[in-house]
Image (cartoon, coloured by chain):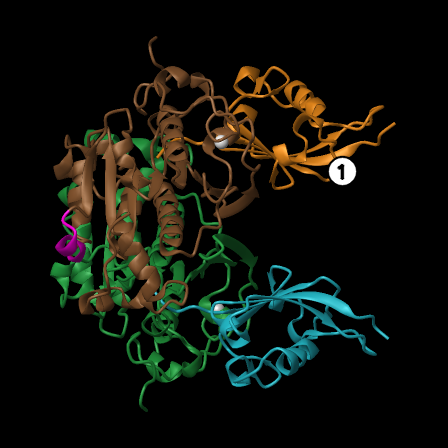
Chain colours: A orange, B cyan, C green, D brown
Amino acid sequence: MAAPIAIHLEFGGGAELLFNGVKEHHVTLPSQSEPWDMKQLLVWIQRNLLKERPELFLQGDSVRPGILVLINDADWELMGELEYQLQDRDNVVFISTLHGG
Amino acid sequence: MAAPIAIHLEFGGGAELLFNGVKEHHVTLPSQSEPWDMKQLLVWIQRNLLKERPELFLQGDSVRPGILVLINDADWELMGELEYQLQDRDNVVFISTLHGG
Amino acid sequence: SLTSKPALSNEDIMRYSRQLLLPELGVQGQLNLSKTSVLIVGCGGLGCPLAQYLAAAGIGRLGLLDYDEVELSNLHRQVLHGEENQGQAKALSAAKAVKRYTKLHIMWNSASVQYVQFTRHLDFTDLIYDIVADCSDNVPTRYLVNDACVISGKPLVSASALRMEGQLTVYNYRGGPCYRCLYPVPPPPETVTNCSDGGVLGVVPGIMGCFQALEVLKIASGQGSSCGQQLVMFDAQDARFRSIKLRPKQPGCAVCGENPSVTQLVDYEAFCGSAATDKCRKLNL
Amino acid sequence: SLTSKPALSNEDIMRYSRQLLLPELGVQGQLNLSKTSVLIVGCGGLGCPLAQYLAAAGIGRLGLLDYDEVELSNLHRQVLHGEENQGQAKALSAAKAVKRYTKLHIMWNSASVQYVQFTRHLDFTDLIYDIVADCSDNVPTRYLVNDACVISGKPLVSASALRMEGQLTVYNYRGGPCYRCLYPVPPPPETVTNCSDGGVLGVVPGIMGCFQALEVLKIASGQGSSCGQQLVMFDAQDARFRSIKLRPKQPGCAVCGENPSVTQLVDYEAFCGSAATDKCRKLNL
Ligand SMILES: [Zn+2]
Ligand SMILES: [Zn+2]
């Protein structure tokens, strides 16, 4: 069994509007048999935080195009994307790309 | 005996010009009988880094008026100023106030 | 504070539509802006973009204060002034340029942009303004503006820039420290570098002046600033911003402390041992 | 690239004296600026301050490109346009306003500010420019500008702003990623919010446009930008900047990768399923 882990979630660039406008969320992921990875985190977010219109946040088993994911201040592409195994106290940011000028 | 400690020094706002224009210095303070405090750090900086015109940096046993000291991203006034005891890996910033507009 | 506009006109609604859409601003925030007056001390590299964005956003009244005239060496950063304004008072040149953004306001407030002659003794009548922005370029003026703000109870949105660095703090705001709490003793004149000596990349005060405009607009609209008791430092070379928690208001501060020794404006050139200009650094005493 | 000015005139030395003093710029940096041409795509909230500060700093040639006309709702943030310019092409209005800052340059290069009519198909003849700044307001234009920069080998200084947030990255710079490396698939049109829908506080693009000017000037002068493979995010509400390390150039990228499928400009409105304007969000196919 992996112990519960506390992580810090942030939403920005408008993605926070899907979460009642709340930019920062301190959450605890419950104990489970395997370590938590990003793929499971997305499912957890959909079930526990994302109240409506999941298609504006998710597409298939990943985030929709136009949302950048940052793990501990680095692009998740550098960290293994969906396979990244979350650690206690990780900081995960979902930022919607802006296009206005 | 206190063990040697590694600290990160930064100079900005023009204070770096007294240190050959180098903004960041990784230094190791040697082992000594008592723990290192800010007062001793200023003496160490004067002896080891500050090559000329110490009056542009120091006044009496403190920094000259117009230089702000930050310890781990907080004003040193919140940390005990000259009496603050340095810890391994502390970050100490000396920033000269700007007046131009 | 200015008389309240009862409501936004249709033209106001069109003009400000993009910011009226913001939940952080909205109609009430826009009305708050139209009721607020701001004094800009210094119409140089910081004051120009600040005045531009405050006027464009619909601030009710701007006071523009400067002691200096427009010179060719100002134009690389002081974007309200042009070649044709050389030799003119900067405050006047800036006021003429900024009027372009405030035509609608002038319809209900003919004095919406004021040109204030600098007298080296900031008058208390200047402090009919609700918010003061320090965009000055020398130490005596920074102490003068601070003391005037503390004595008259106004928030002070202060920025500075030199070479490729900038600094910003909101002083005397919501119980936070004032400039003297941080700097009780003026720096020795020989340690002060100004833009004439040290140079400045023009867009650095551009960024800092826009940042000042942001904090003024947040205060004026009712959102509030997040830069009280904070120092924001900008390093343009590394494109890096950093925020630092500052000390609280100091009980022993000479002007905002428990037993202030400064209760009216003093001679700041004598106090600092330097002149209230960025041209000639040392005062001959 | 433009013909080199052999040396700075006495008037140039006076005008740029405050930045000539900077060791990071100096005479060689200033000469480099005067040899550099910059294309600004979009003369709105970002493009206005960018054009202003590049012109004032002495950039050799500016190309100003926009498809749109000046409207009343632009004026709260698009500080080169005034009420009197309503209905005018934005690129033309901006070019007239910016000429004020470049009188000296016009003496040696009569084409120092160019008004480029937007055709929705950025022409390769436009890419005589050395550096491109994306100040546009819609997704198809952002892909178009990116691909044009990759194909012609130009660095792209890109910024965006919405509500109270801004983002900045330098793409296709020193081996770093391009826009498509980060965003291989365009966002679903219904997820894209623009300034007409979402609003924007005018000084936020002001800050971001000035920041773009800084990075353009660092590249043009020879210092180099620190924002390649970096995303700078700005939250105006918290007055907080943050820098994020981005992925490297992607070998599989459709335009900058090892086997690019995009080797010339394509139909970006069809690719994105939306129109190259911030007005009407969805393209009727
Ligand atoms: Zn005080
Ligand atoms: Zn690419």
Residue D274, relative to residue D49: is it above or below? above
> Residue C253: where, in percent of width, then height?
51, 73
View extreme (bottom): residue: C285
Residue B73 in picture, x, y percent from top left: 60, 59
Image position, residue C218 (x, y; %) = 40, 46
D56 or C282: nearer the viewer = D56
x%, y% of residue D56? 25, 55
**What residue range appears in magenta?**
D104-110
| Res D192 → quadrant | top left
| Label 1 CA crowd tier, 10 Å (few <14, some 14–19, many 20+) | some
Any magenta on residue D105?
yes
Name the residue at 26% across, 59% down: C76
- Along the horizontal axis of the image, is D97 left or right of D178? left
Q: Chain of mark 1?
A: A
- Foreground residue, D48 or C32? D48
Can you say whether C144 is above or below C228 in the image? below
The answer to whether B61 appears left or right of C183 in the picture is right
Query: Does mark 1's beta carbon lie closer than 8 Å to ligand 2?
Result: no
Q: Is residue C115 magenta?
A: no
Main secondary structure along the magenta-highlighted residues: helix
**Residue D124: quarter of image:** top left
- Identify the residue shown where x is 52% and y is 59%: C229
Hey, which quadrant is residue D155 in on the image?
top left
SS under mark 1: loop
Quarter of the picture holding the C terminus of chain C:
bottom left
Q: Residue at x 80, y 28 (%)?
A: A35
Residue type of the residue flagged with mark 1: Asp
Q: Which residue is mark 1?
A: A88
| Horizontal relation, residue A26 to residue D22: left or right | right
Q: Is residue C267 visible?
A: no
